[in-house]
């Protein structure tokens, strides 16, 4: 019998990580088993990201490496956003890649593997506006936390972003299907779910909006924490904000991509809000949800970004008081509108701006975190810390806290007092359960 050990290596965002579980679900039900590493697998699938050129170069390097360890009869597939973007071209460029599949073609994986074993190389990059993978049970690993994809694709057209091209139009799963999945996860011991979508708060299944979804998932017995990512600032209706504030399970953290603090740059990015509009959303959210942590994504070096534009982004960090930020240098993606914009920012200028931005994000986060030392929080213990003997947990505001305790605590909730901070993460000690303090 042909051996069917499969290894999926994932790059990029949480949507991709959730898709890896989906792919595993599709393959395991066809009799495949999981391998712990690429070396042990007969089928290796590289699940790719296309958001930045750097991510694609890394994947190409990795695919080159896998060529060297590929044995006769092994199958190598490249899937995900970069696979969608390059399609057949990837097969031409990398003759040792057997198949290419985009995000809407994962049902075809078992067939693509079989065809590859018969010597046929293929690319499946059809975008299907109706694909939800509704009948597939993702193969999840963590016992306490799970992602639930509630929406696929994106209808915005931010000029820097390749996602609408690689993941197709926005579509939402039916609320009843999401709730059914949440219930079955809770019955298996999951207590924290993260709802995933490209602009998750624009969720609409034709009948229900994101506020309805938060209320319905938040009411599932056994679910103690509900998170979501990533929202678009324009889709925080009063109904959504009210649901966030009123549903106890919804955590006090929002990852709210700003991208820039300059209205002129935001206009060229086609983000459809201004600096003032963004600040207004933060203000409404904070007014409704005490102790809300706000994290963000910021891009520097977008075409036409002047010194004054960059200064506005830098100032936004302190003005909002972000708890953390993912910071990026603009990376032009073929096929996006930003490649046609004039006034490219020289590399060295963008690099220097990125450095200054990172320093400012760290400074602001460190000051906020220092103010939290001494406060008490509930953490979900997630895993052993990467270094040392401590356990790593997360507060409802998504802050990381290290605490000493037995491995049996993993997957459980503990009340801890934050005793110190490195600037980014906290040390903590367990305390008797007391009411969580509201942050300053
Ligand atoms: S909202 Fe903009 S940045 Fe986000 S996925 Fe859609 S196009 Fe890309």
Image: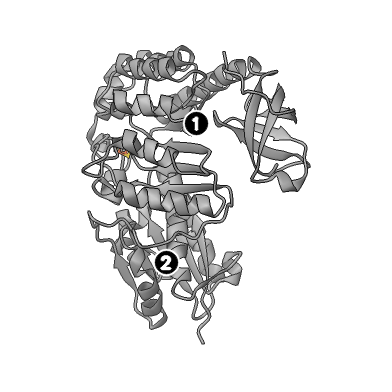
Query: Disc 2 to disc 1, how far (Cα)?
Result: 31 Å
Nearest the eye: 347 or 277: 277
Question: Where's residue 84, x and y in %?
Answer: 31, 56
What residue sits right under mark 1 in the picture? Answer: 251
- Name the mark on residue 30: none
Q: Earlier along the polypeptide chain: callout 2 or callout 1?
A: 2
Looking at the image, residue 357 sits to the left or right of residue 215; the answer is right
Q: Describe the element under mark 2 as helix, strand or loop.
A: helix
Q: Is residue 391 left or right of residue 231?
A: right
Residue visible at 64% across and 26% down in the picture: 377
Q: Is residue 259 visible?
A: no
Please identify the quarter of the rendering in which residue 201 is found. top left
Image height of 36 relative to 3, above or below: above
Quadrant of the picture in which ligand 1 is shown: top left
- Residue drawn at x 50%, y 68% is 67
Q: How many marks?
A: 2
**Depth check, front residue: 67 or 388:** 388
Q: Does label 1 point to a residue whose CB lies under 8 Å from ligand 1?
A: no
**Crowdedness near tag 2: few (<14), some (14–19) or many (≥20) residues, C-alpha within 10 Å:** many
Q: Which mark is residue 26?
A: 2
- Residue 235 found in image quarter: top left
Q: Nearer the viewer, residue 120 or 287?
A: 287
Q: Is residue 38 above or below residue 436?
A: below
**Foreground tag (2 vs 1):** 1
């Amino acid at each position: 019998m042909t051996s069917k050990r499969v290894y999926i290596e994932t790059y990029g965002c949480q949507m991709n990580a959730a898709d890896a579980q989906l792919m595993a679900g599709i393959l395991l039900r066809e009799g495949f088993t999981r391998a712990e590493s690429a070396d042990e697998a007969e089928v290796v699938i590289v699940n790719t990201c296309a958001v930045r050129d750097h991510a694609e170069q890394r994947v190409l390097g990795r695919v080159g490496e896998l060529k060297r360890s590929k044995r006769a009869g092994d199958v190598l597939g490249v899937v995900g956003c970069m696979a969608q973007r390059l399609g057949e071209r990837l097969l031409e460029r990398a003759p040792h890649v057997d198949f290419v599949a985009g995000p809407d073609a994962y049902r075809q994986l078992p067939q693509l593997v079989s065809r590859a074993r018969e010597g046929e190389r293929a690319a499946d990059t059809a975008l299907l506006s109706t694909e939800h993978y509704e009948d597939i049970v993702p193969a999840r690993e963590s016992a306490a936390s799970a992602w639930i994809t509630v929406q696929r694709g994106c209808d915005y057209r931010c000029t820097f972003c390749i996602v609408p091209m690689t993941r197709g139009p926005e579509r939402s799963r039916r609320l009843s299907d999401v709730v059914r999945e949440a219930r079955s996860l809770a019955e298996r011991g999951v207590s924290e779910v993260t709802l995933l979508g490209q602009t998750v708060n624009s969720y609409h299944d034709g009948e229900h909006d994101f506020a309805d979804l938060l209320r319905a998932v938040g009411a599932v017995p056994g679910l103690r924490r509900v998170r979501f990512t990533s929202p678009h600032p324009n889709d925080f209706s009063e109904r959504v904000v009210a649901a966030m504030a009123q549903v106890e399970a919804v955590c006090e953290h929002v990852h709210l991509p700003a991208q820039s603090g300059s209205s002129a740059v935001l206009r060229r990015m086609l983000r459809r809000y201004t600096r003032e509009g963004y600040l207004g959303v933060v203000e409404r959210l904070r007014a409704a949800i005490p102790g809300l942590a706000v994290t963000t994504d910021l891009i520097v070096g977008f075409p036409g970004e002047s010194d004054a534009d960059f200064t506005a982004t830098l100032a936004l960090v302190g003005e909002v008081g972000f708890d953390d930020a993912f910071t990026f240098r603009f990376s032009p993606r073929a096929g996006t509108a930003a490649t046609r914009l004039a006034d490219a920012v020289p590399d060295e200028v963008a690099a220097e701006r990125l450095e200054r931005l990172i320093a400012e994000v760290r400074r602001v986060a460190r000051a906020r975190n220092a103010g939290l030392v001494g406060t008490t929080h509930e953490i979900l213990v997630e895993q052993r810390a990467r270094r040392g003997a401590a356990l790593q947990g997360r507060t409802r505001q998504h802050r990381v806290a290290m605490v000493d305790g037995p491995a049996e605590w993993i997957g459980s909730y503990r009340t801890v007092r934050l005793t110190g901070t490195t600037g980014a993460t906290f040390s903590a000690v367990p305390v008797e359960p007391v009411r969580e303090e509201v942050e300053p």
